[in-house]
Image: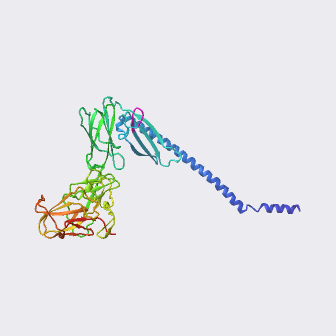
Amino acid sequence: MITFRKLLTKAQSEEGMSLIEVVVAMIVFAIISVGVAYSTVTVSRITQDTGSRQVATNLATTEIDYIRGLQDPFLIDNKKTTTKVGKINYYIDRRVEWVDAAGADVGCGTGTGVMQSKRLNVTVTWDGMLTSTSPVRSDTLLSPDERINDPSLGTIRISVLNVAGTGSAGVGVNITPTSSGAALQEQPAVTNSDGCSFALKVAPGTYSVTVNRSGSVDTNQLASPSKSVVVAAGGSVAALFQYDYAATFSLQYASNNTSGTPALLPTNLDTTYLSTYAPYVDSSGPKSQVALHPFSSGYAGIAGKYIAPIAGTQSCVNVDPAAWPESTVSGKVMAAGVRSPNVAALPQGSTSMPIPMGLMSVKFSGAAYLFAVSTAGPSGSGDPGCAAAPTYVFGQVLKNGTINIALPYGSWVLYSATNAAGTLKTPVPASNLGLVGQVLSILGGGTTVTLDPRVAK
């Protein structure tokens, strides 16, 4: 009996581990292995991040020491640089700002205090930073070697920003005294990378500040814009400009002309460029291209001199297709007018600008000088009007037959004359006028023609 039990016990001991026991053992081993591996990776990343932070601290300290060595705070601008140490990229962001005696910011375009010192902040980040790791930052104050202020004199701070709102560098600055006693020791330098320039120790008085850079214009389309500033003793004043390299627009007058025959344009045609800033009118006649401030929202080109309806002024809105309301004309329901979409280009970039116009044909029996005079639209035309009443000149028409002409939208009376001065002008009869394309024409009083930008519903 004892022998049988020994044999049974031996048999049971040789059965080995079950499948479930093996699986459980592997899961336990995997959990332990993952934990160990994660801990190892985490320790390795923390160790690497700590080393990178030490390098970043050294870079920030080196940047501060370098800047202090320059001594002149006017040489220090905002700047971003990248430095590679080993296999890791480090990003150094240098930010500076003038401050007054109380520590308040006095930028070239902000603040009202007197520049005292320049605050410097250096921030360093690097590739592979842990999300819990803060950037390395270092701050200091830089003071000029000599006083930049005088209780009896003042400072002019010039700020020139581009269309993106950042500094326009390399812009020339010229300051001219415009009042008695006003004087400055020297002209300021060109703007730095922050778009800043400074005129120091300026005598109290009134000054004209002008900026200039080849190929650039401001929001008013001026190549050399000016601002008037008044300098007080012991104070500072800012002259602010938005100024950038111009964008070039190729003009396509009468872009809606599908007749295949070019249309004659007035030699003194006004062109309006509508933007979100303000209308800009160019009265120098038609041209192939124009350079404009590169507003990101762009421009809509309009033939004619658009004058917004402001109280006390003679408005002229009928040249704008969007000013024509929905109405019924000669039994046709006309949809509200639609302006051409805005077109935009980047600084120093280029694009095309369509300028739709009213199109008509004029029949001549011989050579003559042709004139178009704006007039009130006939009753029922829906013409929103142009109180300014411009006159456009086409010059001498050397053709015995019919020509196509283009005019701004609105109502017109055409005249012919035997001389360029237009003396003894004779109205062109309605029988000599025709339509080109889909432009709706309303003849009133036998000589008035309305060029309508709308289409029938």
The residue nearer to you, when weighing 342 against 147, is: 342
Residue 237 at what x, y percent from top left?
A: 33, 37
Q: Check the image and report above or below for 70 versus 43.
A: above
Q: Residue 264, percent across and down? A: 19, 64
Image coloring type: rainbow
In the image, 18: left or right of 201? right
Q: Main secondary structure of the magenta part?
A: loop
Q: Is residue 406 above or below residue 276?
A: below
Farthest residue to the right: give it: 1
Q: Quadrant of residue 194?
A: top left
The spot of residue 394 in percent (x, y) is 17, 61
249 and 375: which is toward the camera:
375
| Rendered view: 104 above or below 6 | above
Q: What is the span of residues highlighted in magenta in the rendered image? A: 97-104
- Looking at the image, the residue that sits furthest to the top is 151
Is 102 covered by the magenta stretch? yes
Residue drawn at x 34%, y 50% is 163
Q: Quadrant of the C terminus?
A: bottom left
Q: Nearer the viewer, residue 149 or 456?
A: 456
Q: Quadrant of residue 286?
A: bottom left
Residue 124 or residue 191, whichever sits in front = 191
Quarter placement of the N terminus: bottom right
- Queried whether the magenta region covers residue 214, the answer comes back as no
Q: Is residue 168 left or right of residue 435?
A: right
Provide residue 335's location: percent of width, then percent of height: 33, 66
Number of numbered discs: 0
